[in-house]
Amino acid sequence: MQRCAWATDDLLCAYHDAEWGVPLHDDRMLFEFLCLEGAQAGLSWRTVLAKRERYREVFHGFDIERVARMTERELERALADPGIIRNRLKVTATRDNARAALGAIASHGSLDTYLWSFVDGEPLRNRWKTTSEVPATTAASDRMSKALKKDGFRFVGSTICYALMQATGMVNDHLVGCFRHRQV
């Protein structure tokens, strides 16, 4: 079975086969991916994926309202937890992004509606043959990044936004030779 080249071990294969690129419309899950993609900045996705369960515990299952209410004391406890990436800016950005997400939900009805608006509500289907063809950013991720920053989100550069778009199925970047390309 042929997979995208980055699916190199059991953890990454399981993620690739079951989640990556599948259109996602659940606000809580979209928020989770937004936060985890931001936590990944400068690191490997595998590192974040291995810590995802602990992130879910520390950040209240990524319940947006609950994360938005996290206190400084809770954030300090999170910073001491070896089960997550202990970068102060990334940890505090999670709470700040929850607050920004609540604003986006109030303005747009849902985080889903807001984020998917950057692809007009429909997945973009690419037909890349090699990994080297897959871009790190696109005009859509540039627009998303600019809008998210304007709305108070942090750790949402264009590369992070494009990774979010890939992970949540806003774009299908499975290579055409990958068995998942046609499935998603």
Image (cartoon, rainbow, N blue to C red):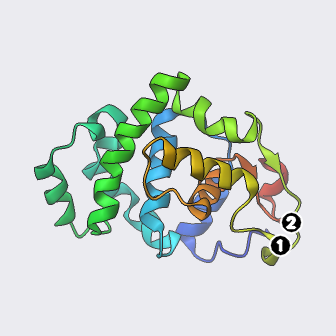
Q: CA distance from mark 2 to mark 1?
A: 6 Å
Would residue 115 be visible to someone looking at this image? yes
Q: Nearer the viewer, residue 25 or 137?
A: 137
Q: Where is residue 118 drawn, in percent x and y?
A: 69, 41
**Mark 2 near mark 1, Cβ–Cβ under 8 Å?**
yes
For label 2, the crowd category at 10 Å Cα-Cα, with few meaning under 14, some 14 to 19 and many 20 or more, is some
Q: Nearer the viewer, residue 61 or 119?
A: 119
Horizontal relation, residue 182 to residue 20: left or right: right
Question: Label 1's element?
Answer: helix
Looking at the rendering, which quadrant does residue 158 occupy? bottom right
Residue, disc 2: 128
Q: Where is residue 71 drawn, in percent x and y?
A: 15, 44
Residue at (46% x, 64% y) in the render: 49
Q: Where is residue 149 drawn, in percent x and y?
A: 50, 49
Question: Label 2's element?
Answer: loop
Q: Where is residue 4 drawn, in percent x and y?
A: 74, 69
Quarter of the image with the N terminus in it: bottom right
Identity of the amino acid at label 1? Glu
User: Above or below — where is 81 with respect to 97?
Assistant: below
User: Above or below — where is 163 with respect to 134?
Assistant: above
For label 1, the crowd category at 10 Å Cα-Cα, with few meaning under 14, some 14 to 19 and many 20 or more, is few
Identity of the amino acid at label 2? Trp
Residue at (53% x, 21% y) in the render: 109
Label at residue 183: none
Q: How many marks are shown on the rendered structure?
A: 2
Residue, disc 1: 133
Would residue 20 be visible to someone looking at this image? no
Q: First in sequence, mark 2 or 1: give its number.
A: 2
Q: Nearer the viewer, residue 75 or 182?
A: 75
